[in-house]
Image (tube, coloured by chain):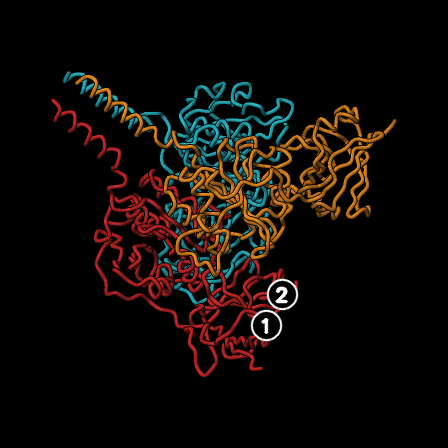
Chain colours: A cyan, B orange, C red
Amino acid sequence: MRIKVYGILILIIVLLSWNKIQAQNKILVFQTDFGLKDGAVSAMKGVAMEVSSDLKIFDLTHEIPAYNVWESAYRLQQTAQYWPKGTVFVSVVDPGVGSERKSIVLKTKSGHFFVGPDNGQFTLVAQSLGIAAIYEIDEAINRRKNSQPSYTFHGRDVYAYTGARLAAGIITLDKVGHKQPASVIVIDYQKAVYENGVIKGNIPVLDIQYGNVWTNIDGDNFKKLGLKYGEQVHVEILHADKKVYEGDMPYVTTFSDVAIGKPLCYLNSLLNVSFALNQENFSTANQVFSGPAWKVLIKKISE
Amino acid sequence: MRIKVYGILILIIVLLSWNKIQAQNKILVFQTDFGLKDGAVSAMKGVAMEVSSDLKIFDLTHEIPAYNVWESAYRLQQTAQYWPKGTVFVSVVDPGVGSERKSIVLKTKSGHFFVGPDNGQFTLVAQSLGIAAIYEIDEAINRRKNSQPSYTFHGRDVYAYTGARLAAGIITLDKVGHKQPASVIVIDYQKAVYENGVIKGNIPVLDIQYGNVWTNIDGDNFKKLGLKYGEQVHVEILHADKKVYEGDMPYVTTFSDVAIGKPLCYLNSLLNVSFALNQENFSTANQVFSGPAWKVLIKKISE
Amino acid sequence: MRIKVYGILILIIVLLSWNKIQAQNKILVFQTDFGLKDGAVSAMKGVAMEVSSDLKIFDLTHEIPAYNVWESAYRLQQTAQYWPKGTVFVSVVDPGVGSERKSIVLKTKSGHFFVGPDNGQFTLVAQSLGIAAIYEIDEAINRRKNSQPSYTFHGRDVYAYTGARLAAGIITLDKVGHKQPASVIVIDYQKAVYENGVIKGNIPVLDIQYGNVWTNIDGDNFKKLGLKYGEQVHVEILHADKKVYEGDMPYVTTFSDVAIGKPLCYLNSLLNVSFALNQENFSTANQVFSGPAWKVLIKKISE
């Protein structure tokens, strides 16, 4: 009798714990260039809810500029690290939809999953988080029921569906399709390097709401200039190797260290070197934008 | 003793299953023309959370152009089918707020629920999903407590409140109010028809992010033209019976089948005939927009 | 034996009820001026999910105009009352980030929690909901692990992290930091007053989607004018004490009581006096906007 009672108790605990026992964390994060004005994002979420109503669904952004694979890559890198291990990101910025690009799931060494077309948008998470495994999605098995073979809205019928099944623990990674070599399609850009007193880097993205310019130069590289807070740097910004901006500004810790409207150099929330005007828009004021073709050069001003 | 233990076990299973036993699936989807810049949508969600914190709340879109009942109708039709049976949609595009329009709950034959003013916005889901039942909301019983009878923000105090109670299973459909005849207020538009080698239809909506033009002509109707992939069609687009666009383009399966900037005819993600420029904006380039007054004519180009 | 079985039953009920027993309601609402185009909001939500995946996360708005602390204050006041007691609001509109403003948690007498910089954005909820207690956030204990002491993105590393821990019931209010006196930084503005047949007030905010002008004059104050529905009022609107608009309009209950394009005076969804053009934009038509510097004067037109 006593054994029976304990058996029941264990059963109950198992039932209560079931969600935790399953492999994934049930968190699904969507990114697209669809905008929020029509029903496309909602249809994707509906498909995910149909797969499992236990999923916790979030948005990274749906305001990636249309077809901008590079910005998609940057937004994934900017945010993935802050989400728990096991989170599944579905990213659909897909200028080549219908052409030959592969549909993949990338698992990074950090334990995050990325679902979408392999068209360059996984460049930066692959480099920064590391590739644990890549599977090509087999659409013969991982496509929404009743979606017509003759035409498929991949974001909804393949990526949302597969991402939801993976996040819900209905399938494991190896059930996605065929395992691939550990490399993704990569977009070329100026990596952060220090040479002869000058640091070179790229402008992957703007802090768009405020018009601040974010580089890919991390704080450790920047230390090689041997700057103290308050010291001046000389900055050049080039687009396709043509100079767009040149100027001096102090390296400071907070915006309010300079007057309103004045330029400053600081470390942003990713601890990367950035340029801003205090309470104004550096980007529009200087016509500096972002993407793989943008390059920055920074040196300390010698006294 | 053994009986008692089994009794307890059953009780536990009932407790664990309680959410599933209730009638609804707890999924609540909001659509409005409120935008996301103020607190109106958030107030609606707060009211829903006050009703039941077990609800899973989503957005269709809040960017319906102000007072555009037609676009509201289209967005509901575009997405409802992808959400699970039992999902409750609260749609508040309400140019006649305070006037005599009825507040209703429409249950479709597909098992979805639609809550909001009966002002034309249910035209398309009623036609495509079928009417199972319609109830008028009795505001004497289905209005948020403490909302003043003298003035009511219907989106928050009636529609969000009633939709949340329905989705949470606190009320069943017949507790909404009085049952109505099975018809909704309908907006007139050109239905898809084939006559003498020409297909006529309407432009219900744009694929706004990309400027693609979506018609209401489904693939089955389109087949009557006897086209093969790659063959040319002749397209005329009229607004209020005045010609706005005329041109030829191929019928293809993917955007990349034509050069960048060239027009194409394709089946969109709803398997409806659509027009686009590859990686450019057909709508702004040709000043073609959407709504009940827009008409398209398509014929095969004879060789 | 019987006792043992009942003991187990009680244990089960406790397990089932555990979420409810904890102090908070697990609802976390974010407001920022970050916009939705980049990854900042998503990073905040990722941090919250890392704290507890049981949280229910919502948005108030992320479209507060950059650095507009006043509008932040208004949006909190507009919506907080509709959310359940125990809801935690994280509001990050922070022009002085990095300067000396305090980071606080405000608990109001209504049982809501507000987390963010104390820079004026809590002016209106403190006045309308009442201050129950204020704690300064001690960043030595309430800052995300692995966020560098040398630089902190407060929205993500302090406010989202602390708000999530509070909402999840991981910490109680008194574990936030040191208790503070019961006052917040306050922004000055024209309070609603009645004098000699004239009501004065402020325009805290626009109903931005429609261009309606919302004042802070509540219905009870407005009654002092002794108006009946349909009677005319004379309205003056001033910016920094300079007249911007002057005109007459009827006091009505619904927009459709006046012709399209005509002005009206009505009580909005917060039961405050508001001005609108029926189906047109009062704000842009008359160049009337909102903020602490805007003042309105209303009197009854004598017959």
The quadrant of the rendering that contains the C terminus of chain A is bottom left
Q: Is residue C51 above or below residue C136?
A: above
Res. A8 in view: yes
* Distance in Å between CA atoms under marks 1 and 2: 9 Å
* Numbered badge on residue C142: none
Side (left or right) of A294 relative to B258? left
- What residue type is disc 1 on? Met
Say which residue appears at 42% left-offset and 51% top-offset: B144
The answer to which image quadrant residue B10 occupies is top left
* Residue A282 horizontal/vertical position (percent): 51, 58
- What residue type is disc 2 on? Val
- Describe the element under mark 1 as helix, strand or loop: strand
Query: Residues at badges 1 and 2 in contact (C-beta under 8 Å)?
Result: yes
Say which residue appears at 36% left-offset and 42% top-offset: B53
* Numbered badge on residue C249: 1
Decide which of A215, A227 is in the foreground and name it. Answer: A215
Label 2 belongs to which residue?
C258
